[in-house]
Amino acid sequence: MTPTIDPKVPPQHDLPTPDPESPVRSRKPYRFSTLCATVENPDQKDQYGSSSVPIYQSATFKGVGNVYDYSRSGNPTRSHLEHHVAKISSAAHALTVSSGMAALDVILRILKPGDEIIAGDDLYGGTNRLLTYIRSHGGVIVHHVDTTNPSSILPFINPNKTAMVLLESPTNPLLKIADIAAISKDVKERAPDAIVVVDNTMMSPYLQRPLEHGADIVYDSATKYLSGHHDLMAGVITCNRDDLKKQMAFTINSVGNALAPNDCFLLLRGTKTLALRMDRQQATSQLVATYLHSLGFRTHYPGLPNHPGREIHERIASGNGAVLSFETGDKEMSERIVGGARLWGISVSFGCVNSLISMPCVMSHASIDPATRAARGLPEDLIRLCVGIEDPVDLIDDLEHALIDAGAIAFDGQQHKYTRVMPSTNEELNRAVEKLGLGEADEQEWFVSAPGKVILFGEHAVVHGVTAIAASVDLRCYGLTTPRNDRKLSVHFADIDNFYHEWNVDSLPWDAVTPIAAGQEHPDILDQTLIDAIVAGPLSGLDEEAKHAKTAGLAFLYMYLMLSHSRRPAINFTARATLPVGAGLGSSASFSTCAATALLLVNRTISLPPPPQPASTASDSSAPHVHISHQGRRFIPPSIAEQVNKWAFVSEKVLHGNPSGIDNSVAVFGGALAYTRAGLAFGGKGGMEQIQGFKSLKFLLTNSKVPRDTKKLVAGVGVLKAEEPELVDGILKSIQSISEEARRALADPELSRTELLSALSALIRENHQHLVTLGVSHPSLETIRTATAAPPYELSTKLTGAGGGGCAVTLVPDDFEEGALDKLLAELVNEKFVPYLTSVGGSGLGILSPYTPPNLAQPQPQTAVPSGQVTPPETPGLVQIDAADPLLRLAFEKQGLSDLTQWANGLGRWMYV
Ligand code: PLP
């Protein structure tokens, strides 16, 4: 194929020479457009010699033992169409069904439960949806891989399990190319029974015939180029193998999704002009792509010299098609361009004689969340053009008007031509950020942190439908991922007996993974097959004593395998916490949040928004306003926070079985939340709600270090409720009022700080008294309560949480005298308790900005602790790490625990939810 397509020279194809062959002068095979226009089936001669195939609008046919009896099984108009489609596809068989998706459905029914599919990671959305369905309902395992790199599918090919490989090339709308020939060869060599299926919609049989490159089944949404007029829905399937044809024809006859006679007629008519339309459409596409490219827009079209898959595409296809896309660098500018076009109709789909324009991120791909779109490299400003048969001059003229009106190009008097106007959001900067956030994640360390939580009001009662108020506590877990260059995955849980373990990435149980397709969420239920495979595989050799580390490892490996199936990064993950582990302060949720965030970042499932504009640009009044949140707060957008929260919840499920979800929500969102169990709500609806305007409060947290069995305590309250329902119901009602009162007070902007503190003090005392009556306190907690309530302190204390390590929270007024506080702390330490002075209601998930390198040169803070602060004990001897390891890991693992927060804060700019 020549780089540019000359529409006047139709490509030659190895297609059948028409019968009869002349004995005197050999005939050349008919060329494609001749084949398209000539609808002839020697086995189906029309009795009247009609030039156009008649529509047999008949459901039944009379007689017994004839070729046709019932249109679900066969219809003469359909037979004509199928014969014709097979001919132009150089296929032995063709089948036609009611839509492109129906075609895929018929093909997928070849599979059995337990079979595995390897599919692209950038597929048409409807294809993803159907694959997700058969995965959850048909027991079929789907691996999504980057098919633009043929070697990326190799690790997934399993001769005993791989039943199908599903490809699209080029992809829509980024026009990425998969080497159908090389992949088919690899699959046949390694798994001879697997079938290679290609969705050929973007090309049509005119430009690409994958059966000639080793594919077993090809399907097209004939709604597009084959019909060409957007006046019908249809799907066609072609293949050479008799057995596959028989199996698929059986399905079509069984389910009844064959194409109806009227649509067969329309599709047959459409195919006659396929070559003619495509020639014109792709010739104009080349002109449009060249025009946009020459203006300096980043343009995606295989016909452009800089297209990355161009060489492969030229080998497997004979034209570049009529879909292209380009980036403007500014989403709003793109919206103006799309809105300003007149000849280009704003519509989804493609393949029509009329030209269409769309913005995939707000139209066809809007259902995929922004973070996933970003991870798939789909720019928000992308404009897709589907070129029709209108005059190219009119089309380019219309596009030029739209570009001028949108301010994307302007006339340059010196150059005497239109030139591109760079968008004010600075495309170069965005590209650099894209590279940082996406392209180079493998070489990067990601440092994240998340807070613990305290239940301020409503613990235990929450089990019975009462609202609980939980708030973040300023004691955090920190997680760091560091790339490794030895194909190993390692974890280091510093606070769980300094546990360290490593595995070969390739030895992990990848076979057991059913990856989540792009844009899809983890199902509600954990994948027990994967859990079993992790326990029996990577965790099997570990000591029984390392029970807690094993559980944390299970949660981490579960997420790693689920999220990394296509990238399989070699990394180390180190977690450290300034918060006591197992004390009921949400240490597990803060760990889950850190691990989820780090894995989502490493795998590019989430990417951070661009950094704030430098001050000089921000002060430029023409530049768009960029919201720089205070101290990095609210920098992480809600869509990312929600995605992290969903995975943190998955991790919590692995760790705890049936968690409420409140701990991970506090760890991600920070501040304070009101939570009521759905279905049990005490006088209101269930759910979780952020308490807006929550004011950070100073609390003393005291760990009594008395281990408490949460399940037993909860069960005890249940027994009491059964024995003395009136007493317990009365208490629950009172606790509900306490929670409501606290919630109102915390969010009330009118309340002065002193009024708020005194209201909360009273509620704390009251709530604690109810918990005592419910029998969930214990002597150590009472000792703490008495010590803090005694003069001169006169502070209010309550137990917190439903069990855990038995902690008490004491509200500390802002003006509480420092000397008194020191004295109280000393008393508590004397009693062998561990007190932490902390604030409640601060930031949630934090990510150290990747836009500035970490400030490792910063002087290390001395071990001096701010007045009155008592810190958790040091982590015992740290794991020896290789000096060649990147600096941040080295420093992180060596840093004293008492300084960890201060050290982390000094590293650079932290960005928070
Ligand atoms: N495959 C691709 C590449 C598509 O673009 C589409 C539809 O847009 C389909 C399959 C599904 O085809 P249909 O809409 O005819 O069911």
Image (spheres, rainbow, N blue to C red):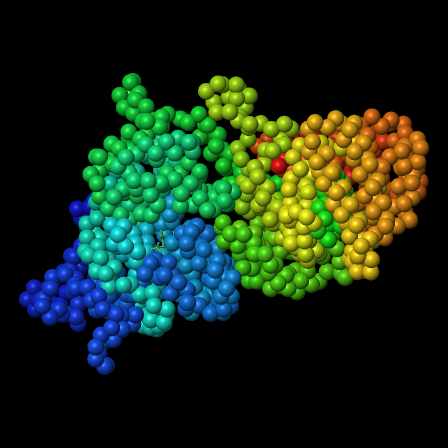
Between 749 and 268, the one nearer to me in the picture: 749
Residue, far left: 24
Name above or below for residue 143 compared with residue 471: below
Q: Tell me residue 409's x, y (percent).
A: 33, 26
Residue, far front: 726
Q: Tell me residue 146's x, y (percent).
A: 46, 51
Q: Confirm whether residue 588 shows in the render.
A: no
Q: Tell me residue 256's x, y (percent).
A: 34, 68
Q: Is residue 682 left or right of residue 208?
A: right
Name above or below for residue 116 compared with residue 640: below
Q: Is residue 89 left or right of residue 243?
A: left
Which residue is pictured at 52% across the width and 18% down the height? 619
Which residue is pictured at 29% across the width and 52% down the height? 224
Where is residue 512, by image quadrant? bottom right
Q: Confirm whether residue 642 shows in the render.
A: yes
Instruction: Locate the C terminus and report the quarter of the image it occupies.
Output: top right
Which residue is pictured at 60% across the width and 52% down the height? 560
